[in-house]
């Protein structure tokens, strides 16, 4: 039976009722600081109102959220809404107390001393990883400009604000300077390039930094394209003069995100964001300011799942952090992009509450409320925004939409929309298109058909994918042919990104392709199309679109790395290496390229090469989580492959195991919500501390992140690796029910069922996986192995040949064809297959072992010995291979070499019975009957139930023992 979903509604201290929310959603919001415990809650449908802090389901989470936070003295603090203080707005001077007031996010009418204050500009710009932000006494420097309050303290203690201010003349000059600078951006709709900081110049004084930062923050708060351009210029100049200021760098990343819809979005812009993120995290890899930049980098790259993880991990941190409102806003945007408006609202509200003067989350909140049909609340918020910034074009357009669609007031809507759309300034094209569309409808209602057509065509040109606008243009007698396609590629990219957020990769790839066709020089569009195609299992087309991306923008390093990744996943190692070599020429010592080379070596099963390249990548950039995951995996596999036959090998094995855990821990420290990092850490725990420790860790992750299947599948993989197939099978079955399109779950299910002897069901699971991805041969390969193991040799051969037709580079298909042929007695086909596999994968030992077995069956013992010798050089082997090699050498007459092989076998596993059987045969050939009899006797002692016991006893009788 399915579990009943419990839902709740929440009443804020202002009396607003929000919800319904699931229990899990409220727990997450408590953990992220959205709810403080002072709100009322009621269980639907007929629960009573009670404090959240008194509801048993949430009590523990509230205690956890408040743990470690300084208590507030009730005599010194009064109740107020929690907020983050950044700077104060200019106010008239108070002669007897303070000379002037500075700009702040949320001014307090009755300033009182802060319990804890942090002045960004009066504290060291670089904070070492282990250090925490120190408090600044409330009676500190009166000239301080930016004071950040501990948000967690504010949540618990309901703090008052108290800020110091510069001279009134300076404040007025700053405001005038910012407004003058806002008209410097391009007004013709052309795309911009993001401005990257240059080399460090002459150092700025603290006062100069304060002045520029005031101007930048004021500009950011106004939330227009032109104001963000001004903020970008100011922040870049600060970084060039004060390169160690990590918080200013984080603010610049926020500005990049706001300007991204208006940017060219080519290799140059991608590189700008990546380089600022890398430099910021290099200052302090675990700093939340670096996580802000990381989130921006991921969101602008369309990696929304990873961005959400990075944001949630930072929100759950209890460290004092001034840009929390930014992360709340980012989290809300991601939820809104998934059309989860209900859960987006409280995050937007929290962002607005913490930074009242930043208009971005307020406008976004109004737009989400509009989508929910709450027109009254949306209109109220938009009126407040326009009161603060009458030039806010997007807010004015949104207000017009609310008036028309929400309240059916066409005259009011016309006044707002006409004024907004005729004004200067730039807004996202899709919002502008919607505004023009409504304006056209108003002209239709007024009977002004010609004006309606002109306006409708403007709307359709801005959003040609909107079917309603297309029909409106055609209905008014216009043409649906669009001129100037190149200018709309960003809108198509935006639409594609929205489809990616919703998991609709089919629609996304169509938008990205259209964007590239509109602007064939935009390599980012082609790269995004390739990513969507890969998700649709169209691997050949994905690789071809990456060729287009590289051709369009030869310096787009990410496209090279991604293409090499896709090619190596299809086992085209030569092609992948060539691509990465080309990338290395363009960007020497680039960490992405070095990581790509490490990934290539990993897939080639070269762990030493993987570690070498990954260490170089980590040296180039020590904040890349994928590099540390790769280092952990490679060291883990290296530790498992080392046979501890001497002290040196024992030390190598131990060191590799320690490094595997160390690098996995580092990856989790960088981003604790990254599933691959957590899974790698759990598997390394299982490998080094015992399987139960890994299982316990994964079960905790499953409880914490119940909404994802990643950890459940990882748990099944751990069970499977320990031969606990029944438990693995149960988890895989639930995974395939929850997500029938999970190829990994179907493959794991098939492997578990095969191990349990459920061959028919296993074959069905493999074929289900094959249907999901017809271009990938893995599922068919597994089906072929199943046929082989059930002695259906001809069917196995046919299945492996199907895999070869899909992907000629797929490894070990020739080997398994050879095994099937050998088992059926076709030695010629088996030997030819072994040769073909050696040619394709010369560093894989299995094909040499197969050839040795064929030569043994043909009694070609010298050739057999040579093949075993090569296999042992390629891969550390167990005692059995050395014994088989000894047999070949003995039967070819090389008794001394045969004895050497047995000595090596004994060093690896002295209790392996077959060693002494072969040793007896060697002594027998040498005529040393006594030693032969002793060896045979030891063989029977170690293997008393040996199938050839009677034969060995007869030999011993013949030898006179």
Image: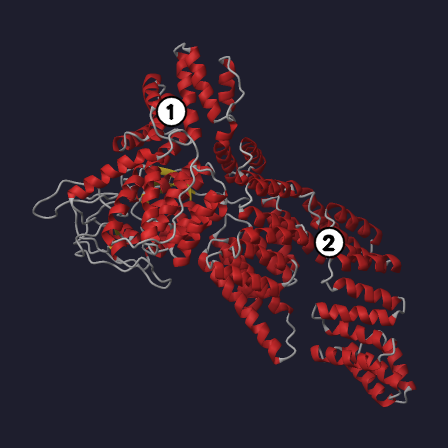
Image coordinates of residue 278 in percent, x first then y, are 44, 53
Q: Residue at x 47, y 47 (%)?
A: 271
Tell me how far mark 2 sits from mark 1, CA to CA.
61 Å
Quadrant the N terminus occupies: top right
Indicate the colouring scheme: secondary structure
Mark 1 highlights which residue? 401
Q: Quadrant of residue 420?
A: top left
Mark 2 highlights which residue? 758
**Residue nearer the viewer, 687 or 397:** 397
Q: Quadrant of residue 200?
A: bottom left
Q: Residue at x 82, y 57 (%)?
A: 833
Image coordinates of residue 543 in percent, x first then y, are 63, 43
Q: Is residue 97 above or below residue 458?
A: below
Q: Is residue 599 above or below residue 868?
A: above
Q: Residue at x 69, y 48 (%)?
A: 765
Image coordinates of residue 269 in percent, x first then y, are 46, 43
The number of numbered discs placed on residues in the rendered structure image is 2
Mark 2 or 1, which is nearer the eye?
A: 1
Name the secondary structure under disc 1: helix
* Residue 559 as seen in the image, left or right of residue 344: right
Image coordinates of residue 417 in percent, x first then y, are 35, 22
Mark found first going from the N terminus, 2 or 1 = 1
Q: Residues within 10 Å of mark 2 (few under 14, many from 20)?
A: few
**Residue nearer the viewer, 303 or 260:** 260
Q: Residue at x 75, y 81 (%)?
A: 903
- Determine whether label 2 and label 1 are within 8 Å by CB: no
* Residue 576 as seen in the image, left or right of residue 10: right
């Amino acid at each position: 039976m399915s579990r009943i979903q419990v839902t709740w509604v929440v009443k804020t201290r202002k009396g607003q009722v929000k919800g319904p929310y699931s229990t899990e959603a409220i727990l997450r919001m408590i953990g992220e600081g959205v709810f403080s415990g002072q709100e009322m809650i009621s269980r639907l449908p007929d629960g009573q109102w009670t404090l959240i802090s008194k509801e048993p389901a949430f009590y523990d989470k509230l205690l956890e959220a408040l743990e470690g936070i300084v208590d507030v003295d009730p005599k010194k603090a009064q109740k107020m809404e929690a907020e983050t203080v950044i700077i104060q707005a200019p106010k008239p001077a108070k002669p007897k107390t303070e000379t002037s007031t500075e700009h702040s996010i949320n001014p307090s009418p009755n300033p009182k001393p802060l319990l804890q204050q942090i002045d960004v500009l009066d504290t060291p710009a670089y904070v070492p990883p282990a250090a925490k932000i120190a408090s600044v006494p409330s009676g500190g420097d009166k000239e301080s400009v930016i004071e950040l309050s501990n948000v967690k303290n504010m949540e618990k203690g309901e703090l008052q604000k108290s800020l110091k201010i510069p001279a009134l003349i300076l404040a007025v000059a700053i405001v005038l300077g910012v407004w003058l600078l806002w008209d410097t951006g391009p007004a013709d709709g052309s795309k911009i390039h993001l401005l990257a900081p240059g080399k460090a110049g002459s150092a700025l004084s603290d006062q100069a930094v304060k002045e520029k930062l005031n101007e930048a923050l004021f500009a950011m708060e106004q939330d227009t394209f032109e104001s963000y351009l001004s903020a970008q210029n100011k922040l870049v100049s600060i970084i060039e003069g004060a390169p160690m200021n990590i918080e200013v760098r984080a603010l610049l990343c926020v500005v990049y995100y706001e300007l991204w819809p208006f940017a060219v979005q080519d290799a140059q812009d991608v590189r700008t964001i990546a380089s600022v993120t890398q430099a910021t995290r290099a200052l302090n890899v675990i700093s939340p300011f670096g996580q802000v930049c990381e989130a921006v980098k991921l969101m602008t790259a369309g990696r929304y799942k990873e961005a959400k993880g990075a944001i949630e991990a930072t929100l759950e941190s209890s460290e004092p952090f001034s840009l929390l409102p930014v992360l709340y806003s980012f989290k809300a945007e991601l939820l809104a992009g998934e059309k989860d408006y209900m859960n987006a609202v409280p995050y937007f509200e929290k962002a607005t509450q913490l930074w009242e003067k930043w208009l971005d989350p307020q406008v976004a909140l109004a737009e989400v409320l509009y989508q929910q049909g709450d027109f009254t609340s949306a209109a109220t918020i938009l009126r407040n925004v326009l009161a603060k910034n009458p030039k806010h074009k997007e807010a004015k357009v949104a207000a017009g939409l609310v008036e028309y669609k929400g309240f059916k007031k066409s005259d009011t809507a016309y006044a707002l929309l006409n004024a907004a759309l005729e004004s200067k300034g730039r807004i996202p094209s899709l919002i502008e298109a919607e505004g023009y569309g409504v304006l056209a409808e108003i002209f239709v209602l007024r009977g002004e058909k010609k004006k309606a057509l002109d306006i409708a065509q403007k709307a359709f040109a801005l959003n040609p994918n909107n079917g309603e606008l297309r029909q409106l243009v055609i209905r008014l007698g216009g043409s649906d042919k669009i001129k100037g396609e190149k200018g709309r590629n960003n809108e198509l990219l935006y639409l594609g990104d929205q489809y990616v957020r919703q998991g609709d990769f089919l629609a996304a790839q169509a938008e990205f392709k259209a964007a590239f066709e509109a602007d064939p020089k935009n390599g980012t569009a082609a790269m995004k199309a390739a990513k969507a195609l890969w998700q649709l299992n169209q691997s050949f087309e994905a690789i071809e679109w990456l060729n287009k991306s590289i051709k369009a923008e030869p310096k787009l390093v990410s496209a090279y790395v991604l293409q090499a990744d896709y090619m190596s996943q299809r086992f085209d190692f030569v092609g992948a290496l060539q691509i990465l070599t080309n990338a290395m020429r363009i960007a020497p010592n680039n960490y992405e390229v070095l990581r790509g080379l490490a990934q290539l070596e990993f897939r080639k099963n070269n762990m030493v090469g993987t570690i070498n390249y990954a260490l170089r990548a980590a040296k180039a950039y020590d904040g890349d989580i994928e590099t540390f995951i790769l280092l952990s995996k490679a060291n883990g596999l290296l530790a498992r492959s080392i046979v501890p036959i001497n002290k040196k090998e024992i030390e190598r094995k131990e060191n590799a195991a320690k490094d595997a855990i160390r690098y996995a821990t580092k990856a989790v420290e960088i981003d604790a919500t990254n599933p691959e990092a957590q899974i790698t850490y759990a598997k390394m725990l299982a490998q080094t501390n015992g399987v139960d420790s890994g299982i316990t860790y994964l079960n905790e992750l499953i409880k914490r992140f119940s909404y994802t299947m990643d950890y459940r599948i990882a748990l099944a993989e751990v069970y499977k690796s320990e031969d606990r197939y029944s438990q693995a099978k149960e988890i895989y079955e639930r995974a395939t029910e929850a997500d029938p399109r999970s190829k990994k779950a179907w493959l794991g299910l098939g492997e578990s069922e095969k191990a349990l002897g459920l061959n028919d069901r296993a074959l069905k699971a493999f074929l289900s996986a094959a249907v999901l991805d017809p271009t990938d041969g893995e599922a068919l390969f597994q089906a072929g192995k199943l046929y082989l193991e059930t002695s259906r040799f001809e069917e196995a051969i046919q299945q492996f040949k199907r895999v070869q037709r899909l992907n000629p580079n797929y490894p070990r298909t020739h080997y398994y064809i050879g095994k099937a042929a050998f088992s059926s007695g076709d030695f010629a086909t088996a030997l030819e297959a072994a040769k073909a596999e050696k040619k394709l994968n010369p560093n894989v030992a299995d094909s040499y072992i197969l050839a040795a077995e064929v030569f043994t069956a043909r009694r070609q013992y010298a050739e057999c010995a040579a093949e075993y010798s090569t296999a042992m050089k390629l891969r550390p082997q167990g005692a059995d291979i050395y014994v088989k090699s000894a047999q070949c050498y003995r039967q070819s007459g090389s008794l001394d070499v045969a004895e050497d092989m047995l000595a090596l076998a004994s060093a690896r596993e002295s209790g392996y019975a077959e060693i002494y059987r072969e040793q007896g045969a060697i002594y027998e050939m040498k005529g040393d009957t006594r030693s032969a009899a002793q060896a045979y006797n030891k063989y029977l002692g170690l293997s008393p139930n040996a199938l050839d016991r009677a034969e060995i006893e007869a030999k011993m009788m013949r030898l006179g023992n």
